Image (spheres, rainbow, N blue to C red):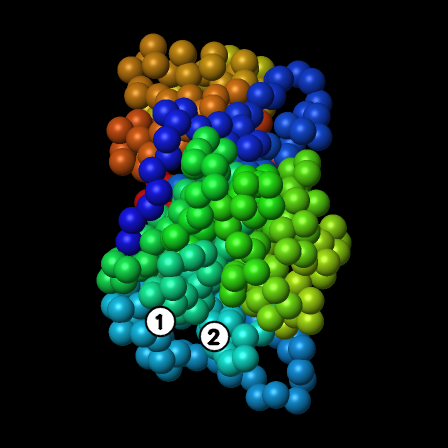
Amino acid sequence: MSSLQIKEEKVKPETNGIVKTSPTAEKTDEEEKEDRAAQSLLNKLIRSNLVDNTNQVEVLQRDPSSPLYSVKSFEELRLKPQLLQGVYAMGFNRPSKIQENALPMMLAEPPQNLIAQSQSGTGKTAAFVLAMLSRVEPADRHPQCLCLSPTYELALQTGKVIEQMGKFYPELKLAYAVRGNKLERGQKISEQIVIGTPGTVLDWCSKLKFIDPKKIKVFVLDEADVMIATQGHQDQSIRIQRMLPKNCQMLLFSATFEDSVWKFAQKVVPDPNIIKLKREEETLDTIKQYYVLCSNRDEKFQALCNLYGAITIAQAMIFCHTRKTASWLAAELSKEGHQVALLSGEMMVEQRAAVIERFREGKEKQARPCLSLLPDKKIERLDTDDLDEIEKIAN
Ligand SMILES: Nc1ncnc2c1ncn2[C@@H]1O[C@H](COP(=O)(O)OP(=O)(O)OP(=O)(O)O)[C@@H](O)[C@H]1O
Ligand SMILES: [Mg+2]
């Protein structure tokens, strides 16, 4: 599988992926929205494994009288051998919780529509990639599967999964409909799968006519919650959906399911089956929590130094209240001879991704995201989600 060349050196993602927050001012709506896409990307970089979920899957079938199938193995899905090979080459032994129910539904004949929600890292992307690859007809040299992602970076992440899973399917080609990928006017795309951001996909389907939307068999709307947080994406997605044929299979995925996402989902996915997976309560059995009372910044720093003197700390993440404190602390700890990396919301998403990558590889012993990396409400719940995340990174 190969992909189209992106012809411009520097591609600006549609939401530009740059998080510009001020440490003192309240975040504007726009900044909050950009944060969501950046966070989703960083989530993927941090999390390289499946989030195991033992919660019950809630399934609402469009036709409640039809039997409900779930699979415990990939063999049961009767995938094409090249695809099964691709799945195993990725190290997947069995379907994840959401995949158990979503895959039989997505692969059923006649095709059925689906709205699926489960927390980040539970295998949604892998599920719809498998569905797209199963439906595609390699001999037909035109786009048949269309996948919308909220940003350029997220489109690339999904593209990578398509390329990995389709590794044993050399006839299958993938095109990226993202800003900066310029094609000649009048050209038609021959790649069978197109993944892109709503604005560019809309241009390619309507104004530029690089894609014939009437020939699309599978339409995927990924990260719907991030999508609707971006100005204009909701309308663009709906306009694209309206160009597709009636019998096109529509699939929508989201990590969260607030009211606005649900309303949008119902607009773009007619007669859907619905799958919901409750968020797993994260267990903290293996984590002990302590607090030290300090009256000022210097006392806090002293307490940290005492900790470092008393116990062996391989790697740690230190969360600070403001960016200013974070950079002060980074400098102080560096003076003490610690290897420190600074991670904060004012950095470009690529820079933050690089810091996380270096931390994972153990090149830095501490990273200290300041408040703006994580939403405020998450900081308030630092003792649950985030510690778990830190634990995962540290391992
Ligand atoms: N059946 C499986 N077995 C093992 N690993 C899997 C399986 N399915 C997916 N994974 C891995 O789990 C991780 C998360 O999967 P995926 O990206 O599909 O989750 P997601 O639900 O789409 O998350 P997000 O909401 O962040 O997009 C990836 O590293 C993926 O390779
Ligand atoms: Mg995903």
Beta carbon at label 1 within 8 Å of ligand 1: yes
Please tell me whether mark 2 or mark 1 is closer to you in this view.
2
Question: Which label number is shown at residue 107?
Answer: 2
x%, y% of residue 198? Answer: 58, 43
Q: Is residue 265 above or below residue 371?
A: below
x%, y% of residue 165? Answer: 32, 59
* Label 1 SS: loop
**N-term-proximal mark, 2 vs 1:** 1
Q: Can the viewer see residue 227 in this picture?
A: no
Question: Which label number is shown at residue 22?
Answer: none
Q: Residues within 10 Å of mark 2 (few under 14, many from 20)?
A: some
Question: Which label number is shown at residue 94?
Answer: 1
Give the position of the C terminus as an image quadrant.
top left
**Amino acid under label 2?**
Leu
334 to the left or right of 227:
left
| Quarter residue 7 falls in | top left
